[in-house]
Image (cartoon, coloured by chain):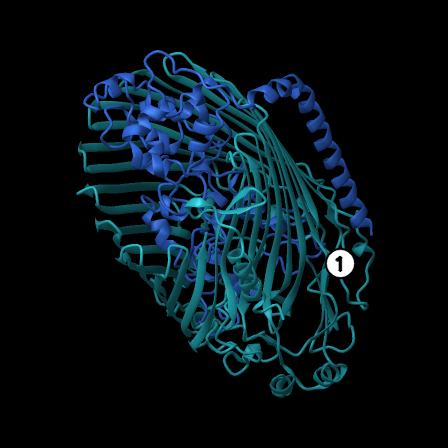
Chain colours: A cyan, B blue
């Protein structure tokens, strides 16, 4: 019933506007106010429409029904003296991605806005599940299948499950919709004062895929119910004088999750057991939380064209949802499973201090210095849990202590710019960044990165602008503690240097590793003939993790492109663009199997991940007959190939046959996708007010992704070890669409 | 119920804080409000000051630009509802005294300030004119910001004499087109298979960035990368009982928000992304065959789904609950 509502509404409005009295000069008037606007209603017909199963990517963030639609509505009422105005806009009215905006303002004094926006997000339309959601967040299977599988021999279970899924897996929607209501009030009592208050309520509802597990061979993918609301309120007051400005702001963000936990039946167990497993699993979903942020920013103009700007901001984040018990498995109990607290009492304090001084002491000289400190202080109490239950299956009577990861980030920089010649500017600068982390829980306490940089801007001719910049940086770390991985999950007394799960001492995590970086950027703007602009651009970045024996070792990318915009005559614009991008990352790892094969160097393997993307665009905006017939044609095409190669520098040996096999690296199949988008429309102005438009849209999306192309609820035929797991079968599928649109519009 | 009470309490405290802020500023504003009543009232027509010709004189010759300018907010404010002496100068508030120019019938530009690539004024001098009124709110950090330091002119992104865009007087019809004049690679990224809804018109560059400069790197609008992301993804904010440190420090450790060919805007596909940091033992360290549950479908997050953090007492270190 909602479908086509926009079309009906638009048609009604269109008819109504025709009845309004016109003023001299073609303006429309209502109640003594000037009225102008535009309404366009029409319909779309699919010559070729993706099937429902193929439409997931097509309608990922859109709703494109085959029906009448209100393409665009814009109404504006204005007082005679143009001081007051009231505006209403609507797009895609009646569709899942509709947007409405109401704005009222008095020029230079106040502005009020209300906006309603909907964003659908489709994850996949091929999802299937045998589960029934008996209450929000609770997913159940028929008892019979659980009983059958529990009692069956291990070898028989895949066959039983496969037969069950073939008949009982039902289509499910895997999509959410975000609905936002936004209120904004801006008030400028005098040109010096600006007061602003904004409130946005965003409600997200729907389902999206989530993975759960009991053991490696017993995974269950479920449609996570999403029912979340975020309230965001911001108020700002600013006083601005000619020489100084002061701004005070406050932001409140409140997140509420109406589905606290996910509970689901274990297909392989009908009854709870302390040793054989649980009949159900329980997972804790995102907890409610709240964040307050206050900020004070000031700017002061100083002599010699100097300016000092500074910000101090303080943030407080709180989270205090009640803990769920360790397990939903009724057969597991232990005194150590008593919770040390009812809730986390989570508390994070953030502090930002930013100071910036800039000056142009001479006409051709500019200087700038800045310092920034961001402190993330997690004051949440550490909690020690005497025992835990792994995935509702296994009791582990080993104490575990939570850790808080506080850090302070310092940034400082300085730069000097010279206008060497009238068209030539040189700027040299230096940046420093330090991460100061809590040394108990992350591998590196201190990292320092130094970045000298230089940039050149050259305008030798009116029509030519050249910009180039180069930055070289080196990041060096203090001692790397490879055992921090253990320290933040076990109590210090349990700390064991050679514990099987300890990370390799050769690993350097890339966000905390020594790194040399080079970055080059180049852009040219050629404005030939006033009507022709050509913009070539090139960029290159190389990250060398020079001391990382294991982990990310090399990460580089480059991009080169060209953008052309040409308007040889009035009413005609041609635009074209091309961009080539390549990304390459090399990482090294080592297969480690305790106890004997933890440090076998022949078990090393290297992965090289590469992405190559080409993006094309071309289009025309032309007035074929001036003020009568307009043509718009736009074609965009993007294709991407991702390769994930892997190899062993040395053939694995020294372990058992199975271990050697596990250490052997193979290439993954390429992941490729491409998107064609062609949009053409002809708009004919019957009169200056009336127009008709016909349009054609072609879209074609192709994807080859070995990870999801053949994903089904039952994957035992692909991976025998997955024979007792249930997936959603959420594929990303190719689609093709040919759409014809026609619309009538009226401008007044 | 307990949660709702907690939330309600927080909301109540916040509301009280807001009311207090409003009251404080209302007290500050009270004298200014009285002034405001007069400032907003239409001002009687006055003769332009010495050296100034008055806007009507400008329009006599510059009819075409005046016609397009008439549709802009600057026209409505400066020429119809000026609030200050500066705004009452109309065209000459920005272009400078035009009497000499008018008396010379346009043959000289003495005293006038022009904008654009051919202007004899430096970019800083052109921008200073805009900043006389606009050096506040979103432009507080303009000086010293990445764009200003590379000599970007206000008129590179904004068009004052013509309403090209619906709002903000942009040089192009939309924010994305305006930014894409230089940030061509970012525009290309919008076409990637994994993307936020920018090309669908639901977001644009200024959803996350303030191109005039901010107190945060990359001209982000909040105090950190993560705080920008939490604006829409507040469920990731925590704090959680069990945190995943690279997540807590920066979402951009794993994600590229502008677009990616990999699911969920990841920079590198799983499991390889995870394996860049996880070299413990057993399955995280195995290179894997592609058609196993460790790789297909959601790869590592087939099991470790709570990768952004978990509040479950038994989720320690594995994020499976």
Q: Residue A346 falls in which quadrant of the image?
A: top right
At x 79%, y 65%, the residue is A332
Q: Residue A484 falls in which quadrant of the image?
A: top right
Dot 1: element: loop
Kindly tell me whether residue A205 is visible in this rendering.
yes
Position above or below: B227 against A3: above
Residue count near mark 1 (Cα–Cα under 10 Å), binned few <14, some 14–19, many ≥20: many
Q: In front here: B35 or B269?
A: B35
Residue B36 lies left or right of residue B21; in this view the side is left
Give the mark count.
1
At x 40%, y 24%, the residue is B90
Position above or below: A232 against A72: above
* Residue A69 image offset from top left, x and y in percent: 51, 66
* Residue A329 image offset from top left, x and y in percent: 77, 67
* Residue A565 image offset from top left, x and y in percent: 25, 50
Q: In front here: B169 or A540?
A: B169
Residue A430 lies left or right of residue A659; in this view the side is left
Residue B274 lies left or right of residue B102; in this view the side is right
Of all chains, the one bearing label 1 is A
Q: In front here: B235 or A215?
A: B235
Q: In front here: A421 or B286?
A: A421
Position above or below: A60 against A411: below
At x 56%, y 69%, the residue is A4
Quadrant of the rendering where the C terminus of chain B is positioned:
bottom right
Position above or below: A252 against A193: below
Which residue in the structure is indicated by mark 1?
A326
Kindly tell me whether residue A414 is visible in this rendering.
no
* Residue B83 image offset from top left, x and y in percent: 51, 23
């Amino acid at each position: 019933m909602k479908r086509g509502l926009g079309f009906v509404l638009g048609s009604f409005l269109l008819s109504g506007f025709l009845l309004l009295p016109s003023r001299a000069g073609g303006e429309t008037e209502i109640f003594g106010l000037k009225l102008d606007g535009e309404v366009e209603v029409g319909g779309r017909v699919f010559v070729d429409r993706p099937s429902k199963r193929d439409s997931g990517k097509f309608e990922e963030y859109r709703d494109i029904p085959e029906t009448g639609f209100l393409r665009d509505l814009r109404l504006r009422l204005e007082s005679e003296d143009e001081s007051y105005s009231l505006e209403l806009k609507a797009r895609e009215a009646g569709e899942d991605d509709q947007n409405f905006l109401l704005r009222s303002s008095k020029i230079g004094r106040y502005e009020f806005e209300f906006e309603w926006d909907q964003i659908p997000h489709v994850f996949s339309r091929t999802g299937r599940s045998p589960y029934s959601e008996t209450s929000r967040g609770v997913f159940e299977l028929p008892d019979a299948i659980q009983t059958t599988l529990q009692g069956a021999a291990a070898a028989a279970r895949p066959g039983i499950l496969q037969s069950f899924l073939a008949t009982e897996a039902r289509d499910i929607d895997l999509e959410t919709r975000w609905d936002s209501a936004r209120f904004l009030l801006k008030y400028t009592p005098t040109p010096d004062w600006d007061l602003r208050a904004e409130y946005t309520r965003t409600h997200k509802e729907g389902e999206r895929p989530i993975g759960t597990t009991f053991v490696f061979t017993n995974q269950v993918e479920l449609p996570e119910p999403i029912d979340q609301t975020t309230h965001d309120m911001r108020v700002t007051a600013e006083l601005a004088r000619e020489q100084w400005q002061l701004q005070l702001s406050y932001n409140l963000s409140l997140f509420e999750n109406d589905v606290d936990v996910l509970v689901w039946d274990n297909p392989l167990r009908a009854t709870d057991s302390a040793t054989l497993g649980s009949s159900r699993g329980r997972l804790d979903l995102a907890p409610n939380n709240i964040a307050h942020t206050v900020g004070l920013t000031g700017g002061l103009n100083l002599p010699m064209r100097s300016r000092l700007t500074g910000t101090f901001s303080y943030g407080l984040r709180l989270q205090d949802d009640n803990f769920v018990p360790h397990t939903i498995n009724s057969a597991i109990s232990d005194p150590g499973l008593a919770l040390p607290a009812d809730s986390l009492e989570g508390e994070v304090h953030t502090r930002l201090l930013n100071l910036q001084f800039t000056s142009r002491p001479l006409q051709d000289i500019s200087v700038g210095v800045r310092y920034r400190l961001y402190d993330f202080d997690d004051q949440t109490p550490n909690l020690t849990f005497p025992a835990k239950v792994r995935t509702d299956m296994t009791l582990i009577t080993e104490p575990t202590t939570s850790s808080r990861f506080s850090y302070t980030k310092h940034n400082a920089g300085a730069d000097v710019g010279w206008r060497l010649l009238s068209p030539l500017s040189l700027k040299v600068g230096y940046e420093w960044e330090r991460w100061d982390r809590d040394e108990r829980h992350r591998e590196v306490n201190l990292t320092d990165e130094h970045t000298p940089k230089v940039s050149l801007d050259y305008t030798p001719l009116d029509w030519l602008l050249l910009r180039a910049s180069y930055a070289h940086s080196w990041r060096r770390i203090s001692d790397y503690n490879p055992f921090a991985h253990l320290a933040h999950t076990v109590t210090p007394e349990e700390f064991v240097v050679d514990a099987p799960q300890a990370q390799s001492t050769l690993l350097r995590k890339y966000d905390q590793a020594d790194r040399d970086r080079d970055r080059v950027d180049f852009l040219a703007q050629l404005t030939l003939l006033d009507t022709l602009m050509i913009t070539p651009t090139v960029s290159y970045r190389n990250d060398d993790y020079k001391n990382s024996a294991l982990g990310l070792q090399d990460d580089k990318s480059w991009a080169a492109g060209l953008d052309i915009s040409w308007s040889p005559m009035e009413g005609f614009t041609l635009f074209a663009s091309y961009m080539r991008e390549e990304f390459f990352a090399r990482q090294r790892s080592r297969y480690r199997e305790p106890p004997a094969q933890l440090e076998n160097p022949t078990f090393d393997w290297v992965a090289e991940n590469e992405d190559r993307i080409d993006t094309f665009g071309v289009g025309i905006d032309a007035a074929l007959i001036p003020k009568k017939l307009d043509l718009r044609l736009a074609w965009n095409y993007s294709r991407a190939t991702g390769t994930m190669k892997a190899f062993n520098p040395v053939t694995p040996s020294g372990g058992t046959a199975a271990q050697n096999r596990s250490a052997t690296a193979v290439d993954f199949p390429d992941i490729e996708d491409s998107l064609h988008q062609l949009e053409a429309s002809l708009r004919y102005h019957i009169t200056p007010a009336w127009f008709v438009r016909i349009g054609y849209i072609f879209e074609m999306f192709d994807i080859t992704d070995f990870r999801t192309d053949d994903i089904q609820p039952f994957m035992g035929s692909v991976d025998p070890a997955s024979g007792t797991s249930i997936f959603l079968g959420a594929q990303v599928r190719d689609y093709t669409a040919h759409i014809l649109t026609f619309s009538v519009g009226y401008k007044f | 119920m307990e949660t709702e009470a907690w939330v309600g309490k927080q909301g109540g405290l916040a509301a009280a804080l807001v009311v207090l802020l409003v009251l404080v500023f209302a007290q500050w504003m009270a004298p200014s409000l009285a002034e405001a009543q007069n400032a907003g009232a239409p001002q009687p027509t006055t003769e332009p000051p010495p050296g100034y010709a008055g806007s009507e004189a400008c329009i006599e010759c510059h009819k075409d630009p005046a016609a397009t300018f008439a549709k802009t907010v600057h026209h409505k404010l400066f020429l119809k509802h000026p609030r200050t002496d500066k705004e009452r100068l109309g065209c000459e508030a920005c272009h400078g005294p035009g009497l000499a120019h008018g008396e010379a019938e346009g043959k000289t530009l003495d005293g006038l300030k022009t904008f654009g690539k051919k202007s004899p004024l430096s970019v800083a001098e052109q921008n200073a004119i805009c900043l006389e009124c606009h050096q506040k709110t979103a432009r507080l950090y303009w000086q010293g910001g990445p764009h200003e330091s590379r000599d970007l002119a206000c008129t590179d992104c904004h068009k004052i004499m013509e309403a090209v865009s619906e709002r903000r007087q942009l040089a192009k019809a939309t924010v994305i087109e305006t930014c894409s004049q230089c940030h061509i690679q970012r525009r290309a990224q919008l076409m990637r298979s994994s993307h936020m809804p920018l090309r669908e018109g639901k977001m644009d560059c200024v959803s996350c960035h303030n191109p005039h400069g901010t107190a945060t790197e990359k001209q982000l609008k909040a105090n950190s990368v993560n705080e920008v992301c939490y604006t829409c993804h507040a469920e990731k904010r925590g704090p959680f009982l069990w945190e995943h440190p690279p997540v807590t420090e920066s979402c951009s450790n794993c994600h590229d928000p502008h677009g990616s060919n990999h699911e969920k805007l990841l920079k590198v596909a799983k499991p390889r992304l995870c394996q860049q940091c996880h070299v413990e033992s057993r399955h995280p360290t195995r290179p894997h065959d592609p058609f196993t549950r460790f790789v297909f479908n959601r790869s590592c997050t087939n099991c470790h789904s709570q990768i952004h953090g978990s509040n479950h007492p038994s989720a320690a270190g594995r994020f499976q609950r």
